[in-house]
Image (cartoon, rainbow, N blue to C red):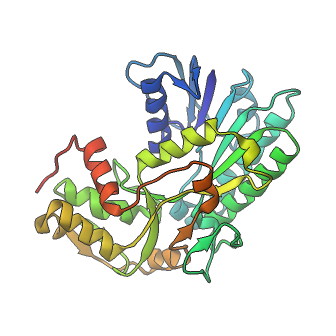
Amino acid sequence: MHILVLGGAGMVGRKFIERLARDGGLGGKPVTRVTAQDVVPASPPPAAPFDFEAVVSDLSVEGAAETLIATRPELIVHLAAIVSGEAEADFDKGYRINLDGTRYLFEAIRRIEGYTPRLVFTSSVAVFGAPFHDKIEDEFFTTPLTSYGTQKAIGELLLCDYSRRGFFDGVGIRLPTICVRPGKPNKAASGFFSNIIREPLNGEEAVLPVSDQVRHWHASPRSAVGFLVHAATMDTTKIGPRRALTMPGYSCTVAEQIETLRKVAGENVVKRIKRVPDPVIDGIVAGWPRNFDPQRALALGFKAESNFEEIIRVHIEDELHGTFVK
């Protein structure tokens, strides 16, 4: 099986490829080749039992998608995007990368006669906009209040239409905010959700730019990889025409995040969080959904953590080798 991972140098892409290397296969089929595309070189996973190729390209450049799918990979995982804060700050770049790049890919696949790969498209809960219900059910309208959310919502519509027409077998997964993200802070408006856990556990100060009462929907990187694996291997005849699914997660406030960190790591770690209000970030986050009732995804077998303590402990286990700075 040949798998193409778009955005393969990013955190979720890297972890997905590492999972493939550990498992050696996907859905009962051996993985023989993985192509990881990104705007920077992706690193090969350790001890990979398959051929690995890193391709540096820009999916939003015409012709790039055609080159990537020329060998007809059986599975395409589309993670390539710029994040929410950057898409809001740079309107043109957001639409070029997040929308044009996606449509170029879909069109390139459509033009190959007899080629119908499984395509997993990563969307976001940012496709929903206020006013919200207490829990957003599967029938809630997609009315995004950010450019990033709009770009992802358009991508979902295209995914459903191209799947309906039989050009590919698409599954769209609306990711919760992935927390705790390893590495350095990025330009995502949601980055502080991870920062206020990750940096204190590393013995560093973290900035909290919003109120303690901000509530949000979370899942760990481990769960995100699990979503991709399940979307890549599931029986799509059970999905129906609505190919975009809200993934499971856990809803909690910033205050609850901090209290859970206190429970797991102690008061000294929590003291490293500094409150510095940022009205721009606060305004973006105010338009995001807070809680979900993802019955379709749960019924189809997707799984995530059931509390925030699990999310913190996944980070300590997977990224900190079981220890942290007290």
Quadrant for residue 135, please give it: bottom right
Q: Which corner quadrant holds the N terminus?
A: top right
Q: Nearer the viewer, residue 5 or 138?
A: 138
| Picture coordinates of residue 103, whole percent (x, y) | 77, 47
- In the rendered view, would you say 244 is above or below 79? below
Q: Nearer the viewer, residue 111 or 235?
A: 235
| Picture coordinates of residue 17, whole percent (x, y) | 48, 31
Is 74 situated left or right of 220 in this image? right
Identify the residue at horizontal 76%, vertical 49% (top origin): 159
Is 112 situated left or right of 326 in this image? right
Is 104 situated left or right of 225 in this image? right
Q: Nearer the viewer, residue 52 or 163?
A: 163
Can residue 243 be seen by looking at this rendering?
yes
Is 48 situated left or right of 87 in this image? left
Q: Nearer the viewer, residue 131 or 304?
A: 304
| Picture coordinates of residue 130, whole percent (x, y) | 61, 80
| Picture coordinates of residue 101, whole percent (x, y) | 70, 46
Residue closest to the far front: 299
Quadrant for residue 58, please give it: top right
- In the rendered view, would you say 85 is above or below 243? below
Q: Which corner quadrant holds the C terminus?
A: bottom left
Identify the residue at horizontal 30%, vertical 42% (top origin): 318
